[in-house]
Amino acid sequence: MLDMKLIRSNPEMIQNNCTKRGFDVDVKALLELDAECRKVTGEIETLRAERNKLSKTCAADPAARERVKAMRGEISDKEAAQAELQKKIDGIVALMPNLLSADVPEGKTDADNLEVRKVGTIPTFDFKIRDHQDLGETLDILDIGRGAKVAQAGFYYWKGKGAILAQSFFFWVQKFLVSRGFTPFMTPCAAKARTLFGTGYLPFFADQTYNLAKEDLALIGTSEQTLVGYHADDVLDGAKLPLCYTAFTPCFRTESGSYGRASRGIFRVHQFHKVEQIIFCRPEESVKYHEFCLENEEMILKQLGLAYHVVNVCVGDLGAPGYKKYDIEAWFPCFNGYREVTSNTNLLDFQARRLNIRYKDGDKRELVHTISATAATDRMLIAIMENYQQPDGSIVVPEVLRPFTGFDKIEAPTK
């Protein structure tokens, strides 16, 4: 959410930002409502001051008593008008996107994202390769059919050595982040509407949310929602910033409108698993910690031996709450290209303003900035499967994961 003071002082810049990001917002009309609301607020304050002054003479002046009585009604009417105006203002501001970093590239889709760098060697194969679905079914480590039978399409099972690989991988990522200064959490898998609104998922991604019937709850689409929401209405100790949090959770998204986009296997699903990086920091340090999270993601991929590239996400692919976002796309041999495996966003004070998260230095109270960055999802596991497949159909386990899996290769089960 944007600061109303910023909107008042830079209306043209805010209007241009909304237009550039594809949001139909009339900033001029908003400021007219704001001016009217502030006018009514001033009238209320004047009436209250006059009432307080007259109240001191009520005992000896019947006319003053009558005037004070009448003023209560006037104040009540104006407070109702003010509340209605403020509701309209808040509704408009809640739909406005965040500011944009100056280096966010122009463009409308992920095809317009700007490559920052390529890392690693793309593997070559002298045999006919299989995609992760074929590998998973042949090795009996991934069962998509029974996921659909038990739930619906978009749900799946890791099983046997596949489940061990997945659990080992996610534990290793968390262990790595702890070594980088992150505090681990186990969070709820559901969140209130206020939490989803505060983190920017409502109203901007409402169609991606699984709501629970008859409850003010929805299944989380990321632990970003529960980790950022953890500090709603808090005043943090500035001396302890940054706060670096991580959590591993199942995540649930409807993926409305997404199917048909090269979605064979489990690349795009309704339930997946994710390790998240969340940072609360001082405003002047958010660029630094945005880069820090990217560094962590790259270190994970390098240790796994996966080729990837980093992209600076364009305006149209950024998402309303984001100020700047990096995606990392790993190489998927059977896709013959790079596909997204992590997403890393600097949100400035957009979430902190909506959730009222501040920090204190002496008497100073300021909004924190937040960084939300993927550390790992199941997509990295399927990248491992495709990149580490062998001519006999087996999959070699990356060396860094072997102390956790207890095996160095996944072979087809003996019949």
Image (tube, rainbow, N blue to C red):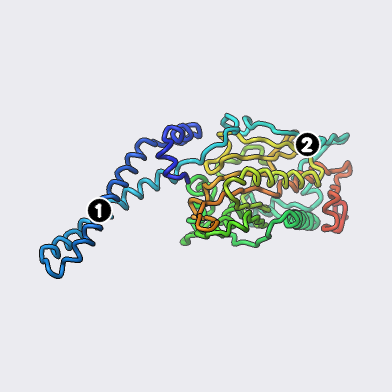
| C-alpha distance separating marks 2 and 1 | 65 Å
Dot 2 amino acid type? Val
Report x, y in % for residue 375. 69, 49
Report x, y in % for residue 151. 62, 55
Dot 1 amino acid type? Thr
> Disc 1 on helix, strand or loop?
helix
First reached walking from the N terminus: tag 2 or tag 1: 1
337 on left or right of 232: right
300 on left or right of 282: right
Q: Mark 2 points at which residue?
A: 119
389 on left or right of 323: right
Report x, y in % for residue 60. 12, 69
Badge 1: residue crowd in 10 Å (few <14, some 14–19, many ≥20): few
> Disc 2 on helix, strand or loop?
strand
405 on left or right of 98: right
- Tell which of 226 and 219 is nearer to you: 226
- Residue 144, placed above or below residue 262: below
Query: Residue 46 — which label?
Result: 1
- Tell which of 265 and 46 is nearer to you: 46
Task: Tell me where residue 70 sits by quadrant.
Answer: bottom left
